[in-house]
Amino acid sequence: MLVQAILIGLIAAFGKLDYQLGTLYAFRPIVLCPLVGIVLGDLQSGLAIGASLELLFMGSISIGAYVPPDECIGGVLACAFAIQLGQSTEAAIALAMPIATLCLAIKNVVNAGMPLLVDRADVFASKGNLKGIYAMHWIIGLVIVVLAFILCSVSFYLGADAVQGLLDFIPTFVLDGFGVAANILPAMGFAMLGRLVLTKQLVPFYFLGFLLCSYANVPVLGVALIAIIIGIDKYDLLGLGGAQSQLSVEGDEDDDF
């Protein structure tokens, strides 16, 4: 149990360390929950819960002064508790947002002291001390990583009984409602992505992919490969545009002659 708690804490710390390395999106539930599943010996549940929680937190992004719930710690702990207690994906969804919101409150208290380190970084910057700036960057990151490790490892080690009591207290119809919501989330996620990326230029390709899947029975991998070919041609990644333009110019001159 103790070893598993430490490993769960290390997974959360790995997710938080991602921010120090340029945000490679390793902190997302779809990446961390399968790791939790491996640690707890149930990779299949980790994959299923990670996919569901990824859809839940898909719109959880920081815009302006808004700080979203902590999807990293919320996802890791919800997945760990659900697998440990033998619960379903619906139970993980029920736990994820409250845990993420509570972690956000704790993180906000810690972040109150971060401006002191940021001010030191400004002082180092004014003096041209690059090593000092790097030091402040890694100290801030280390605080966040250690906090995530402590929260996840201690919570997992001490909180299983409390979480089981909470799940027993939640009425069945509430968990059933979370299950229905989990089935709706994929449509909402794709709709949110569609609002961001769909333009008049891209809509024909969107419906092309739909038609290929629905009427030509092309598998998703085949559609993805077709999309890659279209992208290569559309953006002239092979560098053929210049040669084609030159040929057309020569042809025009011949026609004029």
Image (cartoon, helix red, strand yellow):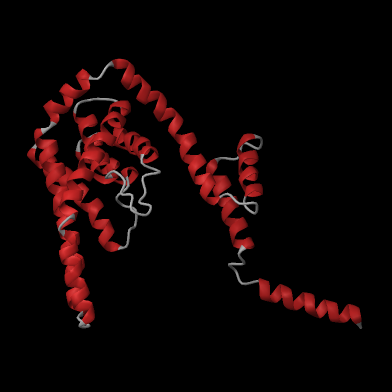
Q: Residue furthest top?
A: 172
Task: Locate residue 231: give its quadrant.
Answer: bottom right
Kindly tell me whether residue 218 is visible in this rendering: yes
Location of the C terminus (image quadrant): bottom right
Task: Locate residue 129: give its quadrant.
Answer: bottom left
On the rendered structure, is 40 left or right of 220? left
Kindly tell me whether residue 10 is visible in this rendering: no
Q: Position of residue 196 (x, y in %)?
A: 51, 49
Task: Locate residue 87: give its quadrant.
Answer: top left
Residue at screen point 25% across, 51% down:
15
Residue at screen point 32% across, 62% down:
22
**214 up-or-down from 13: above or below:** above
Residue at screen point 64% across, 43% down:
207
Q: Position of residue 223 (x, y in %)?
A: 58, 46
Q: Residue furthest right?
A: 257
Name the one closer to the observer, 216 or 249.
Answer: 249
Q: Position of residue 98 (x, y in %)?
A: 25, 34
On the rendered structure, is 243 left or right of 139? right
Q: Position of residue 169 (x, y in %)?
A: 20, 18
On the rendered structure, is 227 left or right of 142? right
Name the one closer to the observer, 113 or 220.
Answer: 113
On the rendered structure, is 5 left or right of 170? left
**149 up-or-down from 257: above or below:** above
**81 up-or-down from 252: above or below:** above
Location of the N terminus (image quadrant): top left
